[in-house]
Image (spheres, rainbow, N blue to C red):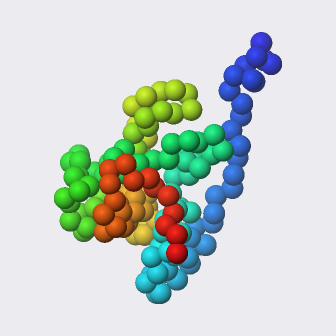
Amino acid sequence: MYRANGKKDPPPNRVKPVPVQVLRRIFTVAMQHNDPFLSCLVDMIARPGKYTGTKSDTTPFEFKVVHLFQGGMRLNLNTAFDVELLAASFASFTFDMHKDSVRGEVIGNAHSGDPNLSHPKIIARRIIHLRNSNATQTHQFEPITQ
């Protein structure tokens, strides 16, 4: 029974998080140089990576499955002002397909209090970048290239 259960759901691979001091330093350097590549880099390092980037992952998050909220109000990512997106208190993703084959599962992260590295702020910056780049609703959340 133990062997069968072990094959069914293997233990997760544990990865040590990047120290927040390193993220803050990268963010500071990116802002000082006004470099969109470095800004994207820090956002991609700090994003909720547990749900993305696995070897078996074939469907990265798309613009259309991301939601930002101010309190209980869902923001329209196409029409909200940048300042409204950056003031979001909660960010969520809706899975079309998850590793457990659960369609429509939603995960979310509330504002942590960090002025720059909170997940809603990170997601808001990526949304703003995508909007400024005329991204479509199916544009994927992947690092930009220089």
For the question of whether residue 110 can be seen, the reply is: no
The residue at the far bottom in this view is 33
Q: What residue is at 43 percent from the left and 35 percent from the top? A: 96
* Lateral position of residue 38 relative to residue 76, left or right: right
Q: Quadrant of residue 122?
A: bottom left
Q: Report the front residue among 105 and 70.
A: 105
Up-down relation of residue 44 to residue 58 (above or below)? below
Image side of residue 81 versus residue 31, left or right: left
Vertical order, 60 against 102 (above or below): below
Image position, residue 70 (x, y; %):
25, 54
Look at 51% across and 33% down and name the residue there.
98
The residue lying at 64 percent from left, 58 percent from top is 17
- Compared to residue 60, the image places residue 89 above or below, namely below
Name the residue nearer the viewer: 118 or 100: 100
Residue 114 position within the rendered picture, expressed as x and y whole percent measured from the top left: 43, 66
Q: What residue is rendered at 56% in x and 52% in y? A: 49
On the question of residue 138 being in view, the answer is yes
How many discs mark residues in the rendered view? 0
Give coordinates of residue 107: x percent, y percent. 43, 41
Q: Residue furthest right?
A: 3
Q: Position of residue 10 (x, y in %)?
A: 72, 30
Quadrant in which the N terminus appears: top right
**Which of the two residues, 130 or 10, is positioned nearer the viewer here?**
130
